[in-house]
Amino acid sequence: MKILFVVLLIVLGIFSMAGAVEKGNLCSLLTKSDVESALNRKMKEPEKAGNGCVYATVDIPYDILIVEVEKGGISGFNQNKKNKAKAGKMKPVEGLGDDAYYDDRQLNILKKRDWISLQSSSLSLQTLQGLAKKVMERLK
């Protein structure tokens, strides 16, 4: 009976460790406050959209930040990186995940086999990197 209980705890632990991404709560990877600080603007409540979360400003001019996580997206990450490199639109980024690059307004990170992207038309690469570090910490 004790062995069954231990196995049950391990299984439940694995599922809970899968965290926000597996439960579909991608909007927990960044708080509204995290994004408000980065943009220095008042934000609406984040909204789940597809494989990610959209953070939008409440006032004009509208601005958004999109955070996406594609579990097992390593092949898409690599293909996108190759395409952007051919087009001359890819800048390698050091210090994030196993691999990372920036293209115009999207920061792409490979963490193990997962593709994480942060997109914004107004945030600098440095700001996106700061937000990406928070996302990656919360994905642990």
Image: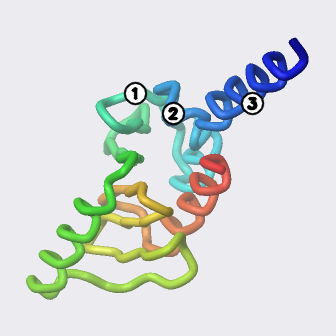
Q: Secondary structure at mark 3?
A: helix
The residue sitting at 75% across, 25% down in the picture is 7
| Residue 22 versus residue 119 in the image, above or below | above
How busy is the neighbourhood of tag 1: few (under 14 within 10 Å), some, or many (20 plus)? some
In the picture as drawn, the residue positioned furthest to the top comes out as: 1
Of 133 and 80, the residue lying toward us? 80
- Percent coordinates x, y for residue 55 in the rendering: 43, 38
The amino acid at mark 2 is: Cys
Q: Earlier in the sequence, mark 3 or mark 1?
A: 3
Identity, as a three-letter code, of the amino acid under mark 3:
Ile
Colouring convention used in this rendered image of the protein: rainbow
Q: Quadrant of residue 77?
A: bottom left
Sequence-wise, the earlier of marks 2 and 1 is 2
Work out whether 139 lies above or below 122. Answer: above
- The residue that label 3 is drawn on is 10
- The residue indicated by pointer 1 is 48
Q: Which residue is mark 2?
A: 27
